Amino acid sequence: MKQLPEICNWGYQDLLELPFEETDIYEYKSSKVPLDQLKNKISKAASAFWNSGGGIFIAGVNDEGKVDGGIPCKSGKQSIRDWVDNAIKFTEPLGDYEVNIIAKTNESCNIKDNKVVLIIKFNESNQVPHMAYDKKYYIRVGSHSGGAGHFLVEALRSLRNISRPNLRGVMKYHPTKPKIEELVIVSVNDSVALDVKLTFDPFPKALEEHYFEDFPLEIALIDRNNPFRMEISGFGFRNQAFGEKPVKLILNYKDVIGNEYTTEQTISPHKNLQPMAIGEDIFEKLTKAIDGLANKLQPK
């Protein structure tokens, strides 16, 4: 993920500290570019940066990032701010962006009267691919924006179908062990959860004595075809396993592009269960301990 600077509070001094050449983050356009051409270049930049993790477009500076006079502060009767919004609207779908306009502040700066330096920050987008005004797709490669080939466009399009993994914990009867209840972590959509970390708050009594140091549990992958389950309670003894009050299930995980998520869910020891057949036996020692507890508590 690119680390883009905040531009909302930029002033003329920040323009003096720009890199001396364009990069994968910065694109410069000279004050000499007419507004009708600049409008198209903004749309291409929007497509390229949104398709490539974000970036900053600056108009009113030369190829070395030096202020060279500035662009007009108006297009006819339209303010340059409204003109920018209209220019960006030619890119579909619209992503997130920010605009800062820096005008002349004193006689020593290189921005001319009635001119401005335009700064547009295109934030990272999860709606790729974005198409420019000319019905083409662009990406940022180094210091240049270039057309994206068919394969890359399809790869970008596939990213649009990636949604946040939605994990849910459910208590179920074990399909082959009538006395055992299990906690099953399932994905309720088609997305994959990676590097899942599972823990509880407060910690269930049945796990605390023997397994506390093993938590948080680390699970490489959970999806619809690969749920995770663990035996956690004997039939009729859920209160002994959990305590009288609900516990909080806490899941930390990532999606396939590295975004991190945390979900919390309350599990009650008093809710009824339904059978569910998933997976294979886990925590055999816990099963024996719970069965032993059950035997001890049986009336004689």
Image (cartoon, helix red, strand yellow):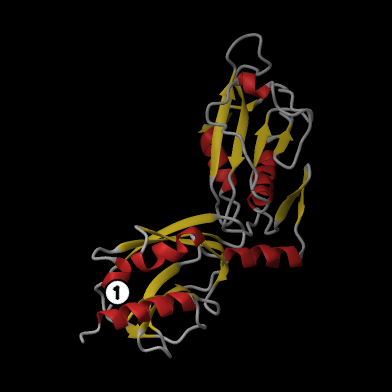
Quadrant assignment, res 192: bottom right
| Furthest-left residue in this view | 299
Horizontal placement of 297 versus 290: left or right?
left
Horizontal placement of 134 versus 176: left or right?
right
At 76% from the left edge and 55% from the top edge, which residue is drawn?
Answer: 147
Residue 11 appears in the picture as rendered: yes
Provide the secondary structure element on which disc 1 rests: helix
Q: At which x and y percent is residue 139?
A: 72, 52
Q: Residues within 10 Å of mark 1 (few under 14, many from 20)?
A: many
Quadrant assignment, res 106: top right
Q: Amino acid at mark 1?
A: Arg
Q: At which x and y percent is residue 291?
A: 36, 81
Horizontal placement of 177 versus 51: left or right?
left
At 63% from the left edge and 40% from the top edge, which residue is drawn?
Answer: 3
Residue 187 appears in the picture as rendered: no
Report the front residue among 185 and 65: 185
Image quarter in which the C terminus is found:
bottom left
At 59% from the left edge and 49% from the top edge, which residue is drawn?
Answer: 124
| Furthest-top residue in this view | 107
Q: At which x and y percent is residue 185?
A: 45, 72
For label 1, the residue is 238
Horizontal placement of 62 versus 14: left or right?
right
Report the front residue among 290 and 149: 290
Report the front residue among 258 and 269: 269
